[in-house]
Image: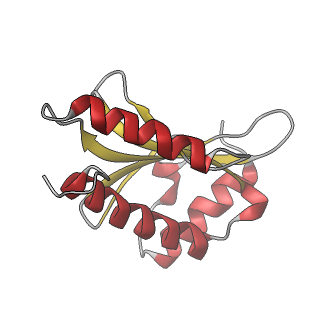
Amino acid sequence: MASENYRKLIDEVCAIAKIANPKLFYTTADVTVDGVNFTLIDGSTEQEEGLAMYCDFGALPVKNRADVLERLLEINLTMHGVNTPVFTVNFETRHVLLARRIPIGHISALDLMNTLSEYSAHSKEWRRTFYLHEAR
């Protein structure tokens, strides 16, 4: 069961977004922001309550696949840190995900919504350029 503070955060996000029945999102919140899919779940540990967020960046390209994967690894190194995002691949869909765990006490509902919007914009940019120097 999701922690009380996670449920409260989901309640606040749903209130801002005018989403009825936030209880439907307590186990798994699958949401779409500007055409980009996200999954939010309770990412609490024994030490700290948290939110786990997954942003679907889309499928890896066939062309320049190795270059794209190398670029994502380079970005992972520059972003490395506590509670920072990391790129990974969803083993079911084979899509690139931007995964992040955020301590509940470090983010408000409005901050979370702004983060979703920001990650959505990054996802769209990646789909266009794969973060390589030239657009595909």
Residue most extreme to the front: 133
| Residue 41 in which image quadrant | top right
Q: Is residue 43 left or right of residue 18?
A: right
Residue most extreme to the top: 91
Measured from the top left, where is residue 59 in percent x and y? Answer: 22, 37
Residue at the location (30% across, 38% down)?
Answer: 68
56 relative to 10, above or below: above
Residue at the location (17% across, 36% down)?
Answer: 61
Residue at the location (51% across, 66% down)?
Answer: 115
Measured from the top left, where is residue 6 in percent x and y? Answer: 67, 53
Asked if residue 9 shows in the view, the reply is yes
Of residues 1 and 79, the one nearer the viewer is 79
Q: Is residue 44 left or right of residue 77?
A: right
Residue at the location (23% across, 61% down)?
Answer: 35
* Quarter occupied by the N terminus: top right
Q: Is residue 129 left or right of residue 25?
A: left
Of residues 57 and 34, the one nearer the viewer is 57
Measured from the top left, where is residue 132 in percent x and y? Answer: 28, 51
